[in-house]
Image (tube, coloured by chain):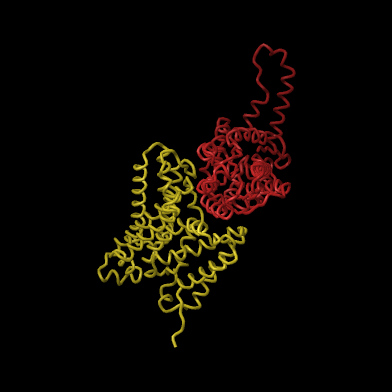
């Protein structure tokens, strides 16, 4: 915290100087007092990013956004890509703790695996920002979609589409233990509790896999040709769900609601073609712009890790 | 008195028949023509992969890199078309890549004499890594306008039968012909049964081994194209899934011993049917994920235990080991 004290002094001094010198220097440009310490505080710092995997719209978008915002400020931006391997991810986080970056940006594969590690990281003084899929441990900040709300909105749309129809719906979950899947399911349950007339004929996990989603949906549609809606949990997977609906000739009759990062080919064009009736987008682009604001905040002599908790969610 | 003996193929067939009967009686909506077609359609790609694996396993090898051949060349087709290349040119590139990949596998195993398990484990990682690092922009390669018409390989129906089932049937016929009607097929069995004896009798065993891996890779690529056409995209990270275990399961469960030289297309079909029936029945019953895994495990365990009771280990297996 020695650094923090020094920076705090600089800020205080800047305030004092500004107060005395302002009238005299009014004719010249004034140096904004927070700029210098802010830049100094960031230069040479390391920010490490551990996504679930690279190579898909969300994580690529976040990576590009963070890099664009952080590197001009002299921040070293590192990435550890566990490529869908939870073990490799836990190892990456563990080794990062010993390397002591200033901030870790973590995308959790499930709610449990990293929880203890993230707590340890914050105890060591590393700020942890969790993105999109949180863990059971609440760190300095969480930035991401509000899964419960997404589940609620998707389900409400499906319930509405079912009015006057069979009231039979199916749910295509992701991977059971992932935050995105478990919390969305909670949102679905919240809405269904208010609508006892809706009957869930199938609620299965397709493991974020389009082929599995297709197989499940095909079977469900054969058993329930009068199905009126499907709540899917991720558009990347629900391409399969939509393909099954299309093959059954039910596009437009079965309401497919899903959510995703808003990739052009995988999401927008499928909405346009009518394959998806509703795709809640937690657009990945504007987000990373906000994180540096968070991480900047963290690098300033502001609150200790785990003291203040920021939650920035959007549907 | 001659004791009643069953081989694994018959046991698995019996398990399949029992399951099928039980589902038909107790599960409303199972025994309908539409559901039967869905059942087959859902396991068609698995079945095609099972055929590729069968060719290699009969020749006493194993091909762990099959999923890479399924994911990367078809993914390349989709990516190239997306980038503005023509469909025939993209397909040709993918087929050449697949053949080159099969040749590398075959060369490593036949000439460099690396055990097939390790060789294909490494080459599979290599190809998947190459795809991710150099070929694809995103994990899931999307369908683009240039591919129009090609989706008929995996969607729609031919004479009322879903196309992917027809593709599985075609693959079955081709592989059965290769294994049973050609000299090369006979050589594969001979090499699988006793590689040393095969070489002594003058069978060109090394080129035949290379051929096995090239054919397997090509069938894998074909399965990938069918899959991509059926879901309108190629989720290339399928390489990281447990699909390869399902493929080995289909082959071994169907009764193609990992010690080589035995089995055929029929075994793959039976193994595929058993897996398909289980998956379909459990989806209709809406059994939870954990429950499904439990049931799968128990059924497979039962099949294996029954087999080891009815066909105890003999001198031959003792010498070779099971794998």
Q: Is residue B281 left or right of residue B313?
A: right
Tell me: residue B201, above or below residue A124: below
Q: Position of residue B275 (x, y in %)?
A: 51, 62
Instruction: Please name the residue shown 39% across and 61% down the image.
Output: B116
| Residue B67 shows in the view | no
Q: In the rendered view of the protein, which quadrant contains the C terminus of chain A?
A: top right
In the displayed structure, does residue B316 sit left or right of residue A286? Answer: left
Q: Which tint is chain B? A: yellow
Location of residue B293 in the rendering, given as x and y in whole percent from the top left corner: 58, 61
Nearer to the camera, B275 or B262: B275
Which chain's colour is red?
A
Quadrant in the picture for residue A147: top right
Residue B66: image quadrant is bottom left
Measured as percent of width and height from the top left, residue A281 is found at: 60, 38
- Quarter of the image holding residue B270? bottom left
Residue sitting at x 62%, y 58% = B288
Q: Relative to residue B117, is residue B317 depicted above or below? A: below
Q: Position of residue A124 (x, y in %)?
A: 67, 45
Q: Residue at 42% across / 68% down in the picture?
A: B256
Q: Residue furthest left?
A: B202
Residue A32 appears in the picture as rendered: yes
- Number of residue marks: 0
- Residue name at image x 33 percent, y 68 percent: B191
């Amino acid at each position: 915290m020695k650094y923090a004290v020094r920076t705090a002094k600089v800020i205080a001094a800047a305030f004092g100087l500004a107060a005395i010198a302002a009238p005299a220097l009014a004719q010249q440009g004034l140096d904004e007092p927070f700029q210098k310490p802010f830049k100094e505080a960031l230069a040479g710092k390391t920010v490490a990013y551990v996504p679930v995997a690279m190579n898909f719209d969300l994580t690529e978008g976040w990576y590009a956004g963070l890099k664009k915002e952080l590197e001009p400020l002299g921040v070293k931006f590192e990435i550890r890509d566990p490529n869908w391997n939870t073990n490799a991810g836990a190892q990456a986080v563990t080794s990062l703790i010993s390397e002591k970056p200033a901030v870790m940006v973590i995308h959790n594969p499930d709610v449990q695996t990293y929880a203890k590690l993230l707590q340890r990281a914050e105890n060591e003084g590393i700020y942890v920002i969790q993105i999109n899929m949180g863990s059971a441990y609440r760190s300095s900040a969480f930035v991401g979609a509000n899964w419960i709300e997404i589940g609620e909105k998707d389900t409400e749309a499906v319930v509405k589409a079912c009015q006057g129809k069979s009231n039979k719906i199916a749910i295509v979950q992701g991977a059971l233990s992932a935050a995105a899947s478990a919390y969305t399911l909670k949102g679905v349950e919240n809405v269904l509790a208010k609508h006892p007339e809706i009957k869930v004929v199938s609620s299965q996990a397709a493991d974020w896999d389009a082929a599995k989603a297709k197989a499940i949906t095909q079977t469900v549609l054969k058993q329930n040709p009068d199905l009126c809606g499907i709540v899917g949990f991720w558009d990347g997977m629900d391409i399969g769900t939509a393909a099954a609906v299309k093959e059954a000739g039910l596009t437009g009759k079965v309401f497919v609601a899903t959510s995703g990062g808003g990739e052009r080919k995988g999401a927008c064009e499928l909405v346009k073609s009518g394959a998806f009736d509703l795709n809640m987008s937690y657009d990945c682009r504007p987000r990373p712009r906000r994180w540096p604001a968070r991480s900047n905040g963290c690098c300033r002599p502001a609150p200790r890790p785990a003291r203040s908790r920021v939650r920035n969610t959007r549907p | 008195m001659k004791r009643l003996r069953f081989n694994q193929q018959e046991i698995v067939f019996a398990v399949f028949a029992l399951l099928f009967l039980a589902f038909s009686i107790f599960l409303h909506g199972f025994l309908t023509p539409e559901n039967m077609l869905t059942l087959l359609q859902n396991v068609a790609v698995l079945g095609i992969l099972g055929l590729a694996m069968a060719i290699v396993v009969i020749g006493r090898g194993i091909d762990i890199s099959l999923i890479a051949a399924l994911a990367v060349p078809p993914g390349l087709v989709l990516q190239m078309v997306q980038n503005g290349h023509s469909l025939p040119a993209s397909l040709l590139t993918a087929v050449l890549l697949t053949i080159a990949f099969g040749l590398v596998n075959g060369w490593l195993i036949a000439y460099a004499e690396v055990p097939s398990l390790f060789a294909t484990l490494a080459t599979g990682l290599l190809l998947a890594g190459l795809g991710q690092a150099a070929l694809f922009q995103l994990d899931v390669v999307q369908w683009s306008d240039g591919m129009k018409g090609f989706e008929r390989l995996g969607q729609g129906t031919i004479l009322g039968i879903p196309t992917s089932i027809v593709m599985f049937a075609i693959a079955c016929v081709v592989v059965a012909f290769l294994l049973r009607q050609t000299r090369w097929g006979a050589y594969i069995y001979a090499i699988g049964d006793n590689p040393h004896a095969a070489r002594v009798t003058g069978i060109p065993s090394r080129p035949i081994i290379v051929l096995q891996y090239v054919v397997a890779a090509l069938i894998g690529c074909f399965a990938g194209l069918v899959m991509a056409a059926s879901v309108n995209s190629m989720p290339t990270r399928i390489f990281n899934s447990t699909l390869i275990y399902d493929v080995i399961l289909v082959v071994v469960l169907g009764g193609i011993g990992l010690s080589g030289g035995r089995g055929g297309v029929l075994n793959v079909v039976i193994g595929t049917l058993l897996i398909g029936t289980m998956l379909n029945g459990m989806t209709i019953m809406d059994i939870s994920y954990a429950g499904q895994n439990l049931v799968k495990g128990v059924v497979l365990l039962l099949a294996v235990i029954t087999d080891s009771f009815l066909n105890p280990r003999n001198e031959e297996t003792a010498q070779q080991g099971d794998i």
